[in-house]
Structures are given as C-alpha cells and as structure tokens.
Image (cartoon, rainbow, N blue to C red):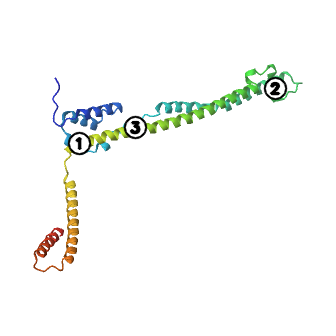
Amino acid sequence: MATKKRKNQNLELAQSLIAWSEKNQVRDDLYVKSLEESLETGIGLQQLAQYDATQTLPHPANAGGFRENRVSENLISIRNILVFVPVAFTWAGISQATTAYSTYTAANPNTIVNFFDFWENGYGVLPKFWTLSNITRIGFFLLTLIIIASIAIAILQKTASTQKKALEEIISRERFNLGFQINQYLFQFKSITPSELNQNSLAAVRELKATAVAISKIVKSAEKNAAELSKGSVIRRQLDALTKMIEKLGK
C-alpha cells in the first residue's frame, strides 16, 4: 500500500538532496540533515526558508587531480635526492681513483703515469666500475633521470590543476542548481520580516508619490489647454476636484 503523502512534503527534492550529499560526502552536515528531514516530513520548512540554500549548502571537497598530485609529490622527493647523487658518486670515484693511484705509484716508483690515464684504464689496480668513462656514463644516466622526472612533475602538476578546475566548475554548478531548486520550493514558506515589510511599504509609498506628482503635472497641463472653458463649467469643477485630491496624495 502506498504511503499517504503528507502536506508540504517534497520527496523528489529530498531524494535529489540525498543523492547530491552522498555523492559529495556531506550527508552528515547539519543543514543537509535538517533540510532532508523537513522535506520528507513537511515540518520545519518555514524556518529553513529563511536561509538561502545556494549560500548555506556545504561546499564539497574537490578531489580533482589527487592521484596526479600524489605521484608528483613522490617524484619531487625522488628527484631532490637524485640531484645530489651524481656529485656524490663523482667524488666517490675520485676518492677510489686517488687511492688506487697512490697504491700503483708506490708499487711502481720508476713508472710515470698520468692520473687521468690511470683513472681511465685502471692498470689492474682500479676496478672497472670506478673508471672515468664508467663514472661519466652513470652520471649522465642519473642527470637524464633528473630531467625526465622534472618534466614528468610539470606535466602531472598541470594535469592535476586542469582536473581540479574542471571538477570545481561541476561541483559549483551542481551545488547552485540544487540550491536554486530548494529556494524555489521553500519560497512559499518564507515569512516576511518587519524590516522587509517596512522596506516594501516605503518603496510603495515612494512610487505612489511619484505617480501622483506625474498625474498632477499632466492635470496642470490640461488646465492650460482648458483655459477657454468658463470658470463655473462642470469640466472645470471636476478638474479642480481631481487636482486637489492628487495634491493631497502627493503630500
């Protein structure tokens, strides 16, 4: 058996509110909970009508570009470490080559060998891993990785920013549309406050005075055109009475 619809219920709007709040993870917001309950029961709508839903609805978190930002942050940490590796690796190679060169010259005092030649060829003392060409090759590889990481970071950050901006537009549009629908429905329950009533009354009085002044000017112009009428004619008396009544309204 279908449930009887209560007065002032709007279950369709309530379902739209629930779907939006669950999608954006704001179901526990106090305003959302109160509005959902009032739309489902039809109770308390007059109080909620005093608030502008487009301003009061919670602002959902924007998770756009979250994955890209996380990967970018990890790459930044790795790149910052890699920046120092080529320098440290080069100094380690120099240290190994210097030690091996000292050992070689001590063992072969009569042999003169250029340090860079020794560093490149090893002469059976310096391991091949620490030779000059190998260190240069590894340093070039590390610098290439740093450059690639920097480019990837820039691309990821740009992508994250674009996604965040696009999602923010969608979130704002959906929030405003829902708030506008809520305002449309709650407008019928909105009570006029004394300040609003006074403002409306003052505006009406000003408009009435302006209208009276305009009519008075028109009548005075008509009087000039009717100057040829006799002073005691019926038309003249009617114009005089109308003029006096308008002047009273304009005061």
Residue 128's image quarter? top right
The residue at which mark 3 appears reads as: 170
Q: Which residue is mark 2?
A: 118
Query: Which quarter shows the C terminus?
Result: bottom left
Residue extending farthest right: 110
Closer to the N terminus: mark 3 or mark 1?
Answer: 3
Of mark 3 and mark 2, the one earlier in the sequence is 2
Q: Secondary structure at mark 2?
A: helix
Could you tell me the amino acid type at mark 3?
Answer: Ile
- Residue 34: horizontal and vertical position, in percent? 24, 36
Placement of the N terminus among the 4 image quadrants: top left
Where residue 207 appears, as percent x and y from the top left, is 22, 62
Q: Is residue 39 above or below residue 251?
A: above
User: How far is the residue under mark 3 from the one under mark 1?
Assistant: 24 Å
128 versus 140 height, above or below: above
Front disc: 3 or 2: 3
Q: Nearer the viewer, residue 122 or 24?
A: 24
Can residue 90 be seen here? The reply is yes
Please state which amino acid type lies under the numbered disc 1. Leu
Q: What SS does tag 1 mark?
A: helix
Q: Residue at x 63, y 30 (%)?
A: 145
Residue that mark 1 sits on: 186
Residue at figure coordinates x 20%, y 68% from the top left: 215
Q: Position of residue 232 (x, y in %)?
A: 10, 79
Picture quadrant of residue 172: top left
| Side (left or right) of 24 relative to 195 | right
